[in-house]
Amino acid sequence: MIYLDNAATTYPKSEVFYSAIDDANRNHAFNIGRSSYNSARECFSIMEETRSLLGAIVSADKSNVYFASSATEALNQIIYGLDLNKGDNVYVSPFEHNAIMRPLHLLEEKIGISVKVIPFNDETWAVDEIKCINAFALYPPKAVFLSQVSNVTGYCLPYQSIFELSKTFGSVNILDASQGFAVLPIKKTTSIDFIVFAGHKSLYAGFGIAGFIKTGNVVLNIVKAGGTGADSLNLNMPDNGYSRYEAGSPNIVAVYGLKASLEWHKKVDIEKKERELTGILLSELEGLNNIIVFKPESSARMLGIVSFAIEGYLSDDVGIILSDEFDIAVRTGYHCAPLVHNFIKSIDYGGTIRVSFGAFNSEKDISELIKALKTL
Amino acid sequence: MIYLDNAATTYPKSEVFYSAIDDANRNHAFNIGRSSYNSARECFSIMEETRSLLGAIVSADKSNVYFASSATEALNQIIYGLDLNKGDNVYVSPFEHNAIMRPLHLLEEKIGISVKVIPFNDETWAVDEIKCINAFALYPPKAVFLSQVSNVTGYCLPYQSIFELSKTFGSVNILDASQGFAVLPIKKTTSIDFIVFAGHKSLYAGFGIAGFIKTGNVVLNIVKAGGTGADSLNLNMPDNGYSRYEAGSPNIVAVYGLKASLEWHKKVDIEKKERELTGILLSELEGLNNIIVFKPESSARMLGIVSFAIEGYLSDDVGIILSDEFDIAVRTGYHCAPLVHNFIKSIDYGGTIRVSFGAFNSEKDISELIKALKTL
């Protein structure tokens, strides 16, 4: 199989990841504990080291790195954990995922927050700064959610400038880095409050491990409550420490895998690889007829993901042909992003055909894909 | 190491589990999809088969089996998903875990539900039926949460009779089967609405996979929202189907492991093993001085877990000696159960020394433990 669905989950992973998971399952799959037996204490140390590795990527201290079972869970914890009230304005870009849009919509219906879309130019995909300032002035942002990299189009959003602006209005700023964390650098800044990461995507680790890094001073309310392995007689969740946001048995095996992946990650220039392959695919697609590529004015702002459609085809049908006849795995449809398809005008095609690269793809994968597309 | 902490997480697992996880990571770690490429469709089928295996354990259809990342998450989804309002009475036993107690306590503080403890006799540990009926009559139960097996004491709760009674008052009944699912049979009944299971405990699968089985007609409100891989343009979570409660990328690798473990499980009589070892340990402990065993009148109602204390010792200190000097892993302290320690009177000892058995323990593990305890 030629795997071009790395935006859904990176595959394959590194050999060190596979070995780490197997070793952890066989030798370290304990329920961590601070005062119990040695093996359980060891697990606690590994979690600490992994937090350090994650924090270092964005110059944050390990004490601000919190694990969750998925980026969706992390985003739910943030969205419901913020002090959002009736009438509060929460801004998103047109590129956001349902892991953000659906919890926010629930709060729209439940408590009457107002979800607003930051105006982006649908030709260039640049943010319309004047309209944005006006919107913020008229309806001050309580929170702003932006993706680092769009999961549909690979567009690297200009989140820095938007967050800097919204911060002047006192907004809590959340960067959903599920698609780019550790691949595309995130500059240290005081304008971001939370950064969300997904282990099984850009980190080349497994399902079941993700989280958020607190890079500001916002304390979230408790969303998920439960046992924390300490202070058991207290019916309240702890005020401080990891446990505040990490109820339940930690997925220590997934953490071992993540730690191995993070160490491997440092040795591989994935950004460079993704940029090269993105460039090659874009230029190959230009040579084909009837292809509509959904891309920003500057393809330098794209990373690892290319979405397109073919005139006369529904995207799902192309996906099935590529899989059944050529053993090429792409993802087709709407990719859990509810707003972007109106913005890029892909609805008539039933969404997009999305090709997404990972560290293990090569130019040959692209030539096979192009060969297949030429038969259509 | 002699591992006697199976109530925290079972260890080791079966060889088939280890192989299944490694194989799934290497060959099947895709993001499931119903309309994408073949490998993603295959993952969907494996999830279906695993739901069938889980459902069969309690005579439920696979369509009622929902996955979560942990039993804590499943319980949070149920507790916050029920229509609980100010003044509603929610009952628990004195044995319940913080995965139940803390979310309920949050609702006490937030919306003013009333959490009440079902009266149990602290000599026999039987439910005080007359007091219970009176309590239900005076303060009708909106929901009742009971453990199948107490994670601290191994006590198999008389949940059937309590649920039958509370059902006559229209209660929604939730069985937390984290400690006993698939080991201790659960009779088919119309008095239970939800059964919660934890993959990494009695099912001998990994961290990161758990869930609940809907055995009644209660539809939960959405707690966790996000992408579901389908109907992406809809800002609402689906009304029906698994997706309603399963936002985010499914942990397909953990599901492959769970499936293998469930198949292995059928071939091993774990209940018999646990009963034998529990009996042997109880009789060995009787022969020691200064040991207080926290147990019900009838030890036939205990399964796989024995909690005790030693006069003159804090339980944590015993745990450290057992680990450091004898390489024996037990869990000590309060075990995330906030109410039971007043009930069993273990607070003066800093909680209990908990020994918990799994399928891979043997009589020899007990004799080593007893030998170690004799040195104290």
Image (cartoon, coloured by chain):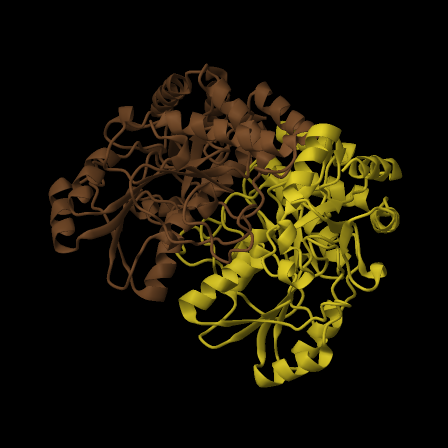
Chain colours: A yellow, B brown
Looking at the picture, how far across and down is residue A203, in whole percent? 73, 46
Q: Residue furthest front?
A: A312
Q: Is residue B28 visible?
A: yes
User: What residue is shown at x 27% (from left), y 38% (from top)?
Assistant: B192
Q: From this view, report whether residue B273 is shown above or below residue B258.
A: above
- Residue A34 placement, left or right of B198: right
- Residue A231 placement, left or right of A128: left
Q: How many marks?
A: 0
Residue in front for this viewpoint, A253 or A168: A168
Residue in front for this viewpoint, B301 or A199: A199
Looking at the picture, how far across and down is residue B33, in whole percent? 59, 38
Q: From this view, report whether residue B118 is shown above or below residue A88.
A: above
Looking at the picture, how far across and down is residue A353, in whole percent? 70, 46
| Figure quadrant of the N terminus of chain B | top right
User: What residue is shown at x 68% (from left), y 69% (from top)?
Assistant: A192
The quadrant in which residue B266 appears is top left
Q: From this view, report whether residue A366 is shown above or below residue A145.
A: above
Looking at the picture, how far across and down is residue B60, in whole percent? 35, 30
Residue in front for this viewpoint, A123 or B270: A123
Q: Is residue B356 visible?
A: no
User: What residue is shown at x 49% (from left), y 16% (from top)?
Assistant: B364
- Residue A204 placement, left or right of B193: right
User: What residue is shown at x 56% (from left), y 47% (from top)?
Assistant: B248
- Residue B190 placement, left or right of A316: left
